[in-house]
Image (cartoon, rainbow, N blue to C red):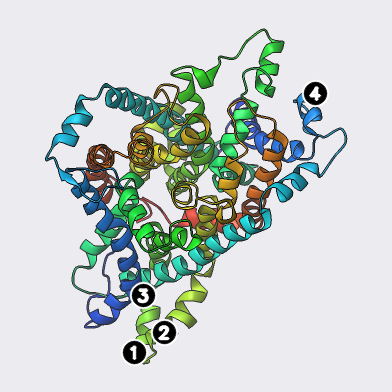
Amino acid sequence: MKISKKVTIPWHIIFIFIIFLLIFPIIFAIGTSFKTLQDAYNNPLSIFPTSPTLENYKVFFESLPAFKVTLNTFIIASVVTIFKVITSFLAAYAFVYFIFKGKNVLYFILISTIFLPFTVTMIPNYLVISKMGLGNSIWGVILPQLADAMGIFLLTQALRSISISLIEVARLDNMSHWHIMKDIVLPLVKPAVTSTGIWFFITSWNEYVWPVLILKSTENFTLPLALQMYISSEGGTNFTVAMAVSVITMILPLALYLIFQKYIIGTFISSGIK
Amino acid sequence: MQVVTSRSKKRFVHKQSILAYSLLLPSVAIIAMFMFWPFLYTIYLSFFDWNMISLTKNFVGLQNYIDVLKDPITYKVLLNTALYILILLVFNFTISYIFAFVLNFFVGKMDGFYKSAFFLPSFISLVVGSILFTWLLNPVSGPVAIVMGWIGLSMPIWSKSEGWIIVVITLITSWKIFGYNFILLYASINGISREIIEAARLDNVPLWKIFFHIIGPMSSATGIYVFIITIVQGLQFSFTPIKIIAQGGPNYASSNAIYHAYHEAFVLYRTGHSAALSILTMAIFVVLLIVEFKYVERGIYYENK
């Protein structure tokens, strides 16, 4: 379609400006994490440190069990991702390829939980996890996250894109459901499963609300909780350290996004979320 | 998000209900245990006076609801909630809708780059976002205040002033959720036939008319979905910056219905009030949910069908 440059150029300028506003904070954090505090106060507008230093990272690793904190975050996100992909995939498979009593009602009820605010479940969940002796444990953070409606929804959408006759032929050949899943369905929806998995991983990695209720002692913290310790409303004396912890917190999600962005955007676009 | 249709009623995997139920069991068990049961228990708690520690819960009937509805703080918080919703919708519904439209039809080159860049902050922790913006927007020494100073403007002490604090927290939340909404709307508009738009352009239909009379109705299913998740999830996402930057203050000025329920439960230990407030908030969301299923699931217009 021919649209005159008079229309497109202002929009390019607007988009570039908005992207600058969205991305600048991230670049600023990376630059500042290598500055000394003095440098950060003297040259707040420059993203490049005058004399780069690793001091801020060193402070983080010396003042907190930083390695343990990073490992906790990684374990929680990995366990949650593996289980959630499996539980969601199995549920999606049942919803797409089976006919059973109460199917539509069950799907409707499960998907409705996407709209439940966490405040209507937080007190009982907190009490249950504490009673199980999992208060202040990463397993207490993991347990409620092992399945969710969003995962079932995304994978149901992905599975519905596979031609049903393919599965019917396999069934007529007496192929077991296990083999259909493993050898037919999974290879076909691999991009969707991969990007859903990455989405779960990053969501869990960044999760703040539930871990902050459960985890009490520093050695059990996740990265977002550790980062919170450096915050005061005035910026504070630990500001450059906070930037270093921010960089550590966002480096893995950023890397995963940059590597898999085509997959991820493609999955969200083709899932036809409605 | 429509109900799964069963296209293969005749031959395929009938009478295998038991296998289907066992495939569903892990998800249903977890969701029942950590979603449905706690939801019912929260309703139960809303009728009791309790502090989470004491061994006895006193049944008080509807007293918690009456207390919550009589408390002036509730109305302050609800008013704040309305302001949050309004600003969230401007950024994450209106602007992302317009951007999705423009990027689909009038940009051509670079649209891949724009999409990736818009979506990128959705992958970053809101705690990181909160700390970054707190510093960037520091009214005295932050970079934004310095740049504004060059042109003689000064920044309000937003962390101490009513109204401004909500604007800043919503900006941070929008930074996180804008890209996700944008991608959904982009996908939906992308599914609309190009020929219709081309034909309208050839007839010299103005762009705003194309937007309101063609794009709007034809992407309405996604549009309504995005509208609702902007409210429901936007309010929940704003919990993080509210807690980190302001703890609901100053004087409840940054608190919303979600944060206040947390504050009642885990700061004041009034589980009854918290539960009652949560259930009332939930009731508002249920109304939205009915709208969602009535219009979106039945479909004003079904895309990609």
**Residue B256: percent from left, percent from top:** 37, 31
Q: Quadrant of the N terminus of chain A?
A: top right
Of callouts 1 and 3, the N-terminal one: 3
Q: Secondary structure at mark 4?
A: helix
Of callouts 2 and 3, the N-terminal one: 3
Q: What chain does badge 2 belong to? A: A
Crowd band around label 4 with a 10 angstrom C-alpha radius: few (<14), some (14–19), many (20+): few
Question: Label 4 amino acid?
Answer: Asn
User: Measuring 52% from the left and 42% from the top, which residue is drawn there?
Assistant: B179
On screen, B180 above or below A9? Answer: below
Label 1 and label 2: CA atoms lie apart by 15 Å
Residue most toward the left? B61
User: Measuring 35% from the left and 71% from the top, which residue is drawn there?
Assistant: B26
Residue annotated with mark 4: A42
Label 4 and label 3: CA atoms lie apart by 64 Å
Question: Label 2 amino acid?
Answer: Trp
On screen, A198 above or below B106? Answer: below
Quarter assignment of residue B14: bottom left
Disc 4 with disc 3 on a shared chain? yes
Of callouts 4 and 3, the N-terminal one: 4
Residue annotated with mark 2: A178
Q: Are marks 1 and 2 in contact (CB under 8 Å)?
A: no
Residue annotated with mark 3: A164
Disc 1 with disc 3 on a shared chain? yes
Residue most toward the right? A51
Disc 2 with disc 4 on a shared chain? yes
Label 2 and label 3: CA atoms lie apart by 16 Å
Residue annotated with mark 1: A172
Label 1 and label 3: CA atoms lie apart by 13 Å
